[in-house]
Structure formats: structure tokens, C-alpha cells
Image (cartoon, grey):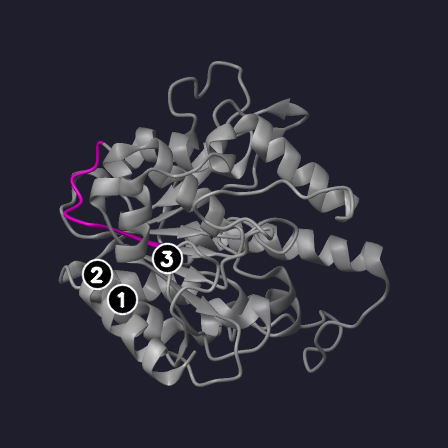
Amino acid sequence: GPSGLPSDLLLRQAADAQQGFQWKGQEDYDAVGDAVVAYVQGQLVALCGLEPLPLPAQNAGEGGATTVVYATPSFREQTAPLLVLICGAPPGGSVGVWGRKLCINASLHEGAMFDYIFRAKQLGWSVLVANPNSNEIAGLLVSGSECSHLHLQTMWNAYVAPAAASSVLVVAHSYGACATAHLLKCEANALERIQAIAFTDGWVNPPGNLLREVVPGVAASQGSASFLAEVAQLAPLACQPASEAVERRLAEVGRDFVSSQLPAGTPVAADRRGDGVPCVSAGHQEHPSTTHAATEVVFAFLQEGLKGRTATSNDELRERCRSAGC
């Protein structure tokens, strides 16, 4: 922290370090949220040792709008497993942030991606942090990142496809699940190389599922409807049926760690949405808290991916669900 002592990653008031955030209205909350997100983004470099990489990579410095993703230095040459971290939709999700609310009211240990990054580094893995909600800069759309789905596709082709990583592992929170499923639909290389996908309370607008999103009707909230309608226009494959290969692979390597009061890892459903993805408890009832609460069981599942056991493990999980009637 500013004092030179190790930070406890808690938001504190400058005038009284014993006091945390105090509500002063939505405008103030949003300003604090923006400051927290900017701080986290800086710490991805200063604290986590990642480096910013331009996206799109091709026209960086040529005058077009460019965003950044964050990665382990020289990860493209490393054969170690690569962990890709994907946040949910804004305003709660942002680059390096699982939940803005948690960063403000709890700690960065819970709300930011730092813990996942540190754990991956301790295991010898490389890390790539997506920035799926950075879709325009100064009013200019970022080419290839006009929505979260296109962002992941562009990031994959620019940085993951040519990387030497032996395996690719994914953690995707909330609506990041849909962007990840779209990636499997449109990139055969991703379908082949991703060995495990841990969704943390993956969100899909009902009655859709990860195999096929559905734009809500007039009864839905205007914000949700317009957001998803724009995604459907920019990434139409998201709203089209998945191939049998995608459906099979998603059922093999995907697992959803969902909000639940049950202990983390407890079987919840063999196939909750009809997309073949089995669900276990994340160990917390609140949506923003699921990624942090499920940390241990998520990493255990990712390790299953490195052993090539996710398909067998998911089949065993489905059988336990059926036996338990869940």
C-alpha cells in the first residue's frame, strides 16, 4: 500500500483507514467503481506481473481504436498450460474484475482476479486475461472487439492460436460463459485445444442456453433486450444452433459452478439448461461471489482437464446427480 506495508486489498477511506466504503448515492458509487477498476487494471501489471498486449494486434499504433488484454510475459513461447480468465458483463465485470461490488464492499482478494493469477503462476501456468467489455475507445469501436463474443474470437486468433501452450484452460464468469460457447462454435482450434472450461454461475438469457442464445422478447427489460439484440447482430452464430461436435465437446469439458447454499462442489444438476453442462455448487448463494467461493473446486476441475479426465469426471457427476435426484 501507500505506506510501504503489504496491502490487505481492502478499500479504505483516506481520512480514516478504519472505515471502508460508505454509500453516498449512485453517482458516487459509480465513480468509486471506475476508480477501483482502473486500480485493478494497473495492478495486473504492477502486482501480478502481467504485460498489456494490444487488441487488435494488427493495427496497433495505426490510428484505429485499440484495447488491451493482459498476459504472462513471453507466454506465446511457453509450452506450459495457459489459463484464460474471462469476466462477466458490465458494470459488474471488467478486465481483472470478477465483481465490482465485491471489490468495493469486500476486498480485491474476493472481487478481483489476483488470486486466480497467483495460483496459476504457482502451478507454472501462463495467464491471459480477456477484456471483453472494452468495445469502444473515445467513441470509436474497437475493430474485432465490438462485443464480448467477437473480442474473445479476435484475442484467440491473435494470441492463443499461435501460442505454444500444451493445454488451454478457461474460467468464465456470468455472461462470459456465452462468449466462451460462441468461441467454440466459430473456432475449430479452440474446440480442439481447450481442455477444461469452468463456468462460474454462467448466465444465459432464458429460454436460451449455451448452445443457442435467445434474444428476449418485449416483456424483458429494455436494457437486457437491447444488449442481447446487439450481440445477436454482431455475432449471429451465438443465436444459431450449435453443431454436434460443439455440443459434445461442451458437455465433455464444461462444468458450471453455480450459486447455491450447498458446500462447494456438491452436485446440483446433471443438465440445468439443456446444454449438457453439469452443475455443482460454487459454495455461495450470491452470483458475484461464486468465482471466489469456488476457487478450490474450480482449480481441482482444471487439473482434471490437464489429465484429460473432464469427460469421465462429468459423466460421473451426472450419474451422481441422477442417483441423488438432482
Left or right of 142 on screen, residue 12: right
Number of callouts: 3
Which label belongs to residue 185? Answer: none
Q: CA distance from mark 2 to mark 3?
A: 11 Å
Task: First in sequence, mark 2 or 3: give its number.
Answer: 3
Disc 1: CA contacts within 10 A as few (<14), some (14-19) or many (>=20): many
Asked if residue 139 is positioned above or below residue 107 in the image, the reply reads above
| Residue at horizontal 56 percent and vertical 37 percent from the top | 134
- Amino acid type of disc 3? Gly
Q: Which residue is mark 2?
A: 311
Secondary structure found at label 2: helix
Indicate the quadrant where residue 318 lies.
bottom left
Residue 230 rendering spot, x and y as whole percentages: 63, 32
Residue 317 rendering spot, x and y as whole percentages: 29, 73
Residue 165 is a magenta residue: yes
**Which circle, 2 or 3, is nearer the viewer?**
3
Asked if residue 280 is positioned above or below residue 273 in the image, the reply reads below
Q: CA distance from mark 2 to mark 1?
A: 5 Å
Task: First in sequence, mark 3 or 1: give its number.
Answer: 3
Q: Name the chief secondary structure element in magenta.
A: loop
- Amino acid type of disc 1? Asn
Residue range of the region highlighted in magenta in the rendering: 162-170
| Residue at horizontal 48 percent and vertical 85 percent from the top | 262
Q: Which residue is mark 1?
A: 314
Q: Which residue extends farthest right?
A: 25
Indicate the quadrant where residue 244 lies.
top left
Residue 82 rendering spot, x and y as whole percentages: 25, 50
Q: CA distance from mark 3 to mark 1?
A: 10 Å
